[in-house]
C-alpha cells in the first residue's frame, strides 16, 4: 500500500471491527487508522469479548496445528510447479504487522447503531 488512506467516501474512518482472531483479519489495522487516533478516542476498534483469549490460544497451544493446516490449504507442501494461486494461502510479501488492540468489546447480545 502506498501510504495510509486517510479518508473514506464518508470522511475519516471512525471504527474498525475485528470479525475474529485470525491474523489476516487484524494485522493491517495501522494501514487504515492511525494508532494516535485510537489512543485519542477519535477511532474505536471493536472485537468480540473472547478476541484476546482466542488470539492467544491460536498463537500459543495451537500454533503447530494452525501452521500445519495453513501449509496444507495454502499448498506450501506442493512442488512449485503444482502450486496455484486461488486467493488463499498466499505468502507474505513483506512489511510489518499493524495490530492495534481492541478498545471496545462486544457480547453476543450487542446491538450497534452507526451514523455517518
Image (cartoon, rainbow, N blue to C red):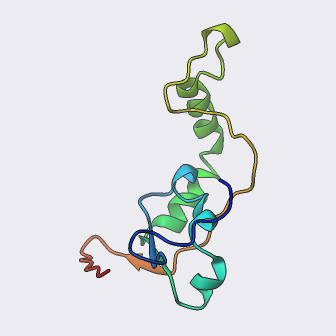
Nearest the eye: 61 or 114: 114
Front in this rendered view, residue 67 or 97? 97
- Name the residue located 61 percent from the left edge and 33 percent from the top edge: 90
| Percent of width and height locating residue 96 | 74, 56
Is 5 placed above or below 96 here?
A: below
State whether residue 95 is above or below residue 75.
Answer: below
Q: Is residue 20 left or right of residue 82?
A: left
Q: Observer-nearest residue: 90 or 76?
A: 90
In the image shown, does 59 or 2 lie closer to the viewer? 2
Where's the C terminus, which quadrant?
bottom left
In the image, 93: left or right of 75? right
Q: Is residue 106 above or below residue 73?
A: below
Task: Give the answer, above or below, for where 54 lies relative to 39.
Answer: above
Q: Residue at x 58, y 52 (%)?
A: 23
Count of marks placed on residues: 0
Residue 63 position by quadrant: top right
Q: Residue at x 45, y 79 (%)?
A: 14
Q: Position of residue 74 (x, y in %)?
A: 57, 27
Residue at 51% x, 72% y is 7
Q: Quadrant of residue 39?
A: bottom right
- Picture quadrant where residue 50 is located: bottom left
- Tell which residue pokes out farthest to the bottom in this image: 40
Determine the residue located farthest toward the front in the rendered image.
9
Which residue is most to the top? 81
**Could you say where residue 110 lies in the image, as x and y percent from the top left?**
27, 76
Amino acid at each position: 500500500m502506498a501510504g495510509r488512506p486517510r479518508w473514506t467516501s464518508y470522511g475519516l474512518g471512525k471504527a474498525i471491527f475485528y470479525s475474529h482472531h485470525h491474523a489476516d483479519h487484524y494485522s493491517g489495522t495501522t494501514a487504515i487508522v492511525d494508532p494516535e487516533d485510537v489512543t485519542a478516542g477519535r477511532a474505536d476498534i471493536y472485537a468480540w469479548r473472547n478476541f484476546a483469549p482466542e488470539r492467544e490460544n491460536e498463537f500459543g497451544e495451537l500454533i503447530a496445528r494452525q501452521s500445519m493446516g495453513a501449509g496444507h490449504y495454502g499448498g506450501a507442501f506442493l512442488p512449485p510447479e503444482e502450486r496455484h494461486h486461488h486467493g488463499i494461502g498466499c505468502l507474505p510479501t513483506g512489511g510489518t504487522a499493524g495490530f492495534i488492540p481492541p478498545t471496545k468489546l462486544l457480547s453476543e447480545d450487542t446491538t450497534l447503531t452507526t451514523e455517518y
